Image (cartoon, rainbow, N blue to C red):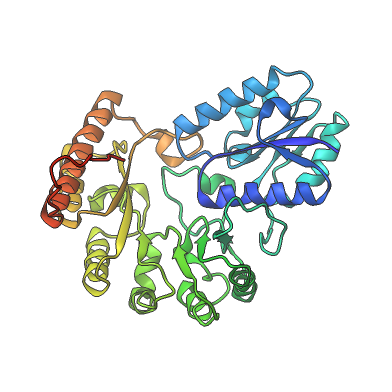
Amino acid sequence: MASIFIDNYGCTANYDNGHIIAGMLIECGHEVVQDMIDADVVIINSCAVKNVTVNKIFYQIKKVKEFSDKKLIITGCMSVSEKEKLNKYLGEGVALVSTQNITHIPEVVEKILKNEQVVLINKRKEIKLGLPKLNPDNKIASIQISEGCLSYCGFCSTKLAKGNLVSYPKEQIVREVEKYVKGGYKRINLTSTDSACYGFDLGYNLVDLLKEIIQIAGEFQVRIGMGNPKHTIKYFDSLLEVMKNSKIMKFIHLPLQSGSNKVLDEMKRGHKVEDFIYMVETLKKEIPGITISTDIIVGYPTETEEDFLKTVEVVERLNFEVMNLSKFASRTGTYASKLKQLPSQLIKDRSVRLSLIYKNLKKNKINETIFIEIPKGLPIIQN
């Protein structure tokens, strides 16, 4: 049996893959260790969304390869999207495994321990439910509801790795939720590549799943993962109603990406700014106190100053509770990588400007809503 170190990166679904990998390996008799130095096998569960993460992972791969006695498995999105660059690291005791093949990792471990080379990056239907899992938290459970998506965003490399939508049957998901609720878990995170298109390939949608989940007995709450606005708008009214249920967390993640319809069209996002604003303002009106998270990309190759200012206008109007701001960086193999790129300094400047605007919005919101008199002499604790 081997000692194995698992290095996870990326989204909630990818971390869940890492926990499943750990659970399967432990069930096979292997030991999962907390330090790479102590490992016979290093598994890098990669993410390919941002260049900074990809570069960090390549650095980690180089570190592992410095140890002649350590075997290496590279799984996650980079195993497919960065395959050409990863080929130079292939050799005896090294494996590439796509996200659709993680249930084969126990077998792959046995092969690389024998100094075999393994490349297993074909796309296939792999339902990640009912599997052994090493949960790091005994109160919060993540459950994957699908893999892949129905979008073709010009900037996204995740699509290259995960492919088209494969939804997991809602009956199996409900059984998984029931299992965790009976085990004492108080929060269930439903996660996927794109939660908004869940079930479209099976003849139903996310709301149909949520309606069954809220019928489960017990005290728990469900948090819905990121959903593409172009799909959310299709059943928004029914989603709004089910979100009012006490078992659904008052949280939603809708990525805007840009406040310009022109840029959204060039990004191949598929939604309109007007629909996005309607959904956010309706959610805030109908569900007071809801937390709305969004993603913004500044510096897309076709973004003009006018386009950028339109994004600023939407941010100022909607004043999101959470905003994940990213500077555009070209990803290998994507449509946007073929476009003429904007100067990096221009992208940085726009990022700084929007970041400052958002920080001021948050500061003003706090000043408007919090009126606490602190008695003299008491310490102020800053988080």
Quadrant in the picture for residue 354: top left
Viewer-closest of 187 and 48: 187
Left or right of residue 11, residue 24 in this image:
right
**Residue 65 position in % (x across, y down):** 69, 21
Question: Residue 67: percent from the left, percent from the top?
Answer: 73, 19
Q: Residue at x 13, y 42 (%)?
A: 376
Q: Nearer the viewer, residue 187 or 16?
A: 187
Residue at position x 28%, y 25% from top?
Answer: 343
Q: Which of the 4 image quarters holds residue 127?
A: bottom right
Q: Is residue 199 left or right of residue 240?
A: right
Tell me if 76 is positioned left or right of 236 in this view: right
Q: Nearer the viewer, residue 339 or 177?
A: 177
* Relative vertical location of residue 330 with respect to residue 280 in this rendering, above or below: above
The reply to whether residue 237 is visible in this rendering is yes
- What percent of the width, then of the height, locates residue 4? 74, 36
The residue sitting at 67% across, 63% down in the picture is: 129
Screen quadrant of the C terminus: top left
* Residue 165 visible in the snapshot: no
Q: Is 1 above or below relative to 163?
A: above
The residue lying toward the viewer, choosing from 200 and 139, is 139
Q: Residue furthest front?
A: 377
Question: Which corner quadrant holds the N terminus?
Answer: top right
Residue occupying image coordinates x 23% and y 67%: 284
